[in-house]
Image (cartoon, rainbow, N blue to C red):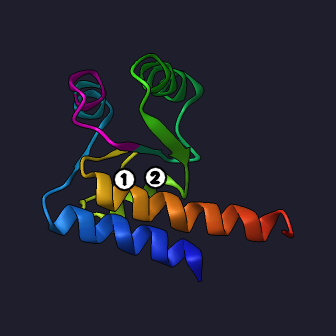
């Protein structure tokens, strides 16, 4: 299943030291240019989501809304939930985006 591949790829990036998590840290990574992709949990609050998306748009950082906070936290081996994850490596970011695009294409019946 592609969803598992997306979360697995995110976990691999974490193991390689290429992931940070938490809204404050991720916003810092967006502003500094370190972040190559932001993954936002689908069940984050509207206020939290708006702040991260606004930062991504302002600094031209790609983002996707994916999984829930529990699944995102589990994928990166975190104790508890994570609402926002920053992938700080272009190759890992591209791999996640490719898997996400495959998933979206499948949903749209293309």
Residues at badges 1 and 2 in contact (C-beta under 8 Å)? yes
Q: Position of residue 37 (x, y in %)?
A: 39, 44
- Residue 59 position in % (x across, y down): 39, 21
Depth check, front residue: 38 or 94: 94
Quadrant of the rendering where the C terminus is positioned = bottom right
Q: Nearer the viewer, residue 110 or 7?
A: 110
Q: Would you say residue 77 is visible in this rendering?
A: no
Mark pair 1, 2: CA separation: 5 Å
Label 2 crowd bin: few (<14), some (14–19), many (20+), radius 10 Å: many
Circle 1 residues within 10 Å: few <14, some 14–19, many ≥20:
some
Instruction: Tell me if residue 104 comes above or below residue 49 in the rendering.
Output: below
Residue lying farthest bottom? 1
Note whether 5 is above or below 105 in the view shown: below
> Which quadrant would the N terminus be assigned to in this image?
bottom right
Which label sits on residue 81?
Answer: 1
Q: Quarter-wise, where is residue 83 in the image?
A: top left
Residue at point 22%, 35% (across, down): 34
Q: Which residues are magenta?
A: 29-37
Residue sitting at 50 percent across and 22 percent down? Answer: 57
Label ID, residue 69: 2
List x then y, in percent, for residue 48.
47, 26
Is 89 placed left or right of 85 in the picture?
left
Q: Which mark is residue 42?
A: none
Quadrant of res 16: bottom left
Against 35, residue 105 (above or below) is below
Instruction: From the viewer's perspective, tell me whether residue 103 is left or right of residue 27.
Output: right
């Amino acid at each position: 299943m592609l969803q598992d591949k997306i979360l697995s790829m995110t976990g691999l990036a974490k193991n390689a030291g290429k992931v940070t998590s938490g809204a404050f840290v991720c916003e810092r990574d967006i502003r500094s240019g370190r972040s190559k992709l932001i993954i936002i949990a689908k069940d984050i609050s509207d206020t939290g989501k708006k702040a991260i998306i606004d930062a991504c748009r302002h600094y031209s950082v790609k983002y996707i809304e994916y999984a829930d906070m529990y699944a995102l936290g589990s994928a990166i081996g975190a104790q508890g939930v994570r609402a926002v994850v920053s992938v700080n490596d272009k190759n890992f970011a591209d791999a996640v985006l490719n898997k996400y695009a495959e998933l979206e294409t499948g949903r749209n019946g293309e």
